[in-house]
Amino acid sequence: MHLVFFGAPGVGKGTQAKFVSKHFRIPHISTGEMLRAAAKEGTELGLKAGALMSEGRLVPDDIMLGIIRERIQKPDSNKGFILDGFPRTLFQASQLDDLIEELSMPALVCIEIVVPDQDVINRLINRRICDSCNTDYNLITNPPPEDLICTNCGGRITQRKDDNRETVSRRLEVYQQQTAPLRAYYQEKGNYYKIDGLRGIAQVQNSIFKLLTDHKF
Ligand code: AMP
């Protein structure tokens, strides 16, 4: 099961990828989470990526491709993986296909989660996140505890630096310009499925699980 979860920021890719990862025992590979961890550690890559991320801009393709090349060759990716936040440009997508072929992995299946822009904006500006285990909270629909201590791991709940209104607009612009064209790319390849993300988390999860079990990817 070699999956690409595709969609604008805030559609629920990360939340759903975590469910799929746990149930089907394949790693959830979120490039955003990897970059945030590097930024937190203060590595050279992390510092460079951190600056771009907080402006809502993309990290250069060559860096991202290096990260993914290394990650999908780890033994836990043998039976598959869920890519979340990668690829984000047509160049990344075509290079990823070359890499998959080079490594003799099965063709990727793309699942797009679709949510209208205005809902995505509301979700992102109200999103809070545990900076240790990445559990998501939402000020309206799933408020964090008052002490801002994560109920899952005891970590600290914060707001991502790029979840403010201004950066969210920039991220959506970048998404429309550079990432949305991937829809046509995957549609043309034939391994493309669309899921309505404007429903409860459990309903979206059911649709995705049904798709995955019906098709036996
Ligand atoms: P995300 O957590 O997926 O919303 O990603 C947060 C930020 O990390 C993005 O706004 C980009 O700055 C950076 N990023 C994550 N994945 C990629 C990628 N595949 N290509 C370029 N930049 C990325």
Image: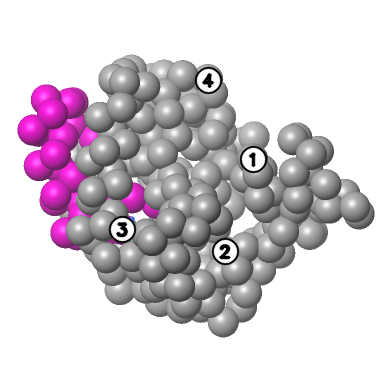
Q: What type is the residue that disc 1 sits on?
A: Cys
The residue carrying mark 4 is: 23
Query: Can you give x and y, in whole percent of width and height, for residue 89 in the image?
Result: 25, 61
Q: Which mark is residue 88?
A: 3
Disc 4 is placed on an element classified as helix
Q: What type is the residue that disc 3 sits on?
A: Arg
Q: Residues within 10 Å of mark 1 (few under 14, many from 20)?
A: some
The residue carrying mark 1 is: 133
Q: Nearer the viewer, residue 215 or 71?
A: 71
- Which portion, as a residue range, is magenta? 85-110
Disc 3 is placed on an element classified as loop
Callout in the foreground (3, 1): 1
Mark 3 or 2, nearer chain start: 3
Q: Which mark is residue 120?
A: 2
Alpha carbon distance from label 1 to label 2: 22 Å
Q: Residues within 10 Å of mark 4 (few under 14, many from 20)?
A: few
Query: Can you give x and y, in whole percent of width and height, for residue 25 in the image?
Result: 46, 19
Alpha carbon distance from label 4 to label 1: 18 Å
Q: Farthest residue toward the right? A: 146
Q: What type is the residue that disc 2 sits on?
A: Val
Q: What type is the residue that disc 4 sits on?
A: His
Query: Can you give x and y, in whole percent of width and height, for residue 38 in the image?
Result: 46, 53
